[in-house]
Image (tube, rainbow, N blue to C red):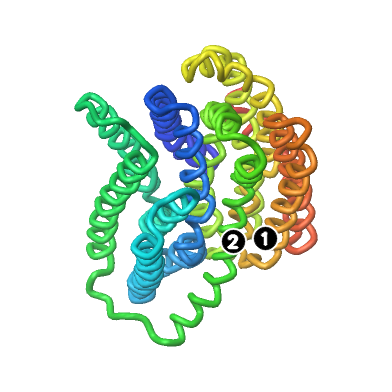
Amino acid sequence: MSRGRTSAIDAAIALLIRVLGAGLVFGLQVLLARLLPGEEYGGYVTVWTWMLSLGSFAAMGFAESSVRFLPRYTQRQRLQALFGYWQFGLAVVLIVGAAIAATAFGIWLGAGLDGPLLTIVLVAIGLPVLGLEYYLEGIARSMGWFRLAAVPVYILRPILIGGSCLGLSAAGVTLTLPIVGGVLIGCMGTIALLLLGLVTRRINRLAGGARGASNKQRRLWLRASLPLLVLSGLEDLTSYSDILVLSLLSEPEVVGLYFAAARTLALAGFVAYAMTLVSGHRFAMDLASSNRTELQSSILEATRLTFWATLAAVGVTLLAAPWLLAAFGSGYLAGQSVMVVLGLGMVARAMSGQSAEALVVLGRQREGLLVALGVVAVTVVGALALVPEQGALGAAIASAIAMACRTVALAVLLWQREGLKVLSLRIPVFLRHRAP
């Protein structure tokens, strides 16, 4: 089986998992929009968005640096280094998470949960759990265990959250932001513990007899991970900065409408993530083999698969937009124009394929950091300029412009620094081989 076809099959399996997960997340958002009043749902959106945008910081960059080190250690049978990375990264994430949680409980005990403090405390309590989850997902993705990386988080978690909220509502409990926030964090913790058990079991089976890492190795991992801490955090802020600015400038109902439109379009956006699950591991294996030709081929094929699959998914989702938004309620139909603009931005982003993943594998995290800073700046400045006049549509326009700038910057950067091409809109190789 050809490399292109193998990557396409792996990506297709990952995509099926994420499409199912996207459907479940969409259903969860519809459920919460129906169960919660508009203002309470907007508050939930604000909490969840801040949590997602800051979650990577709690993983301390180890979720991202794992894709640089673990495939290399696996291929070269350096089991001691593999096991040492696993132990050290887990210890760092747990220690940082404990400090964040202690701070959150201190705020809770000292100031209570009135007003904006409720959002701050819920976010701070959820960050350690999300950081652990990100780290475990990164380990699974780096080892090529993409089903393990996706199924617990994107399928089991929304089922657990939705089932818990339905159960509480059926029992006569009035769902408020503190209650839904508690359910969200509790379900996240349950999934994180499940994932921790499964990943630990696999790592121990593979390299459990290995000894710990040396101080020199720990310093290497820290030097590689800390820049990625900022980079991954900025990448998340890039994804959510439009919503964050909108939440500061608009009413909760407007934020809820925008979030509903963005989450609906996320049904198409998970295509790129499905490719990320398999591409980083592929790039790292090519680099470990010192095969630049295969690395170039893998990057271009990842771009083709990401672009064409995203274009098709965005088109289908926009056609179904009226019915999908109507599921939230008639008031959410105004989000169709937002979806169109965000869809254009998503296609523009897909044109760069998996360039960000390639930068991490190549050790170009500093350059990636500059790109991420620029994208966040464009999004925030654009949103600040457009939201007061255009509202939710202004936030969408700012996001789409930022995504186009990101594609151009990544393509230029990889060509200038590594001599690697990124842009390719040709049909994927495995499909061309089927042509008569």
Q: Nearer the viewer, residue 303 or 227?
A: 227
Left or right relative to 297: residue 278: left
* Residue sitting at x 26%, y 61%: 200
Q: Is residue 16 visible?
A: no
Residue 53 appears in the picture as rendered: yes
Residue found at the very far left of the displayed protein: 171
Residue closer to the observer: 369 or 278: 369
Residue occupying the point 74% across, 34% down: 394
Mark 1 Cα-neighbour bin, 10 Å: few <14, some 14–19, many ≥20: many
Label ID, residue 334: none
Q: Are marks 1 and 2 in contact (CB under 8 Å)?
A: yes
Where, quadrant-wise, is the C terminus in this rendering? top right
**Secondary structure beneath disc 1?**
helix
Q: Which residue is mark 1?
A: 368
Query: In the image as oriented, which residue stretches furthest toward the bottom?
Result: 215
Q: CA distance from mark 1 to mark 2?
A: 8 Å
Residue 30 location, x and y as percent? 43, 24
Disc assigned to residue 360: 2
Q: Nearer the viewer, residue 45 or 236?
A: 45
Q: Is residue 380 above or below residue 315?
A: below
Q: Is residue 428 above or below residue 359?
A: above
Q: What type is the residue that disc 1 sits on?
A: Gly
* Image: 312 above or below 85: above
Give the number of the mark in front: 1 or 2. Answer: 1
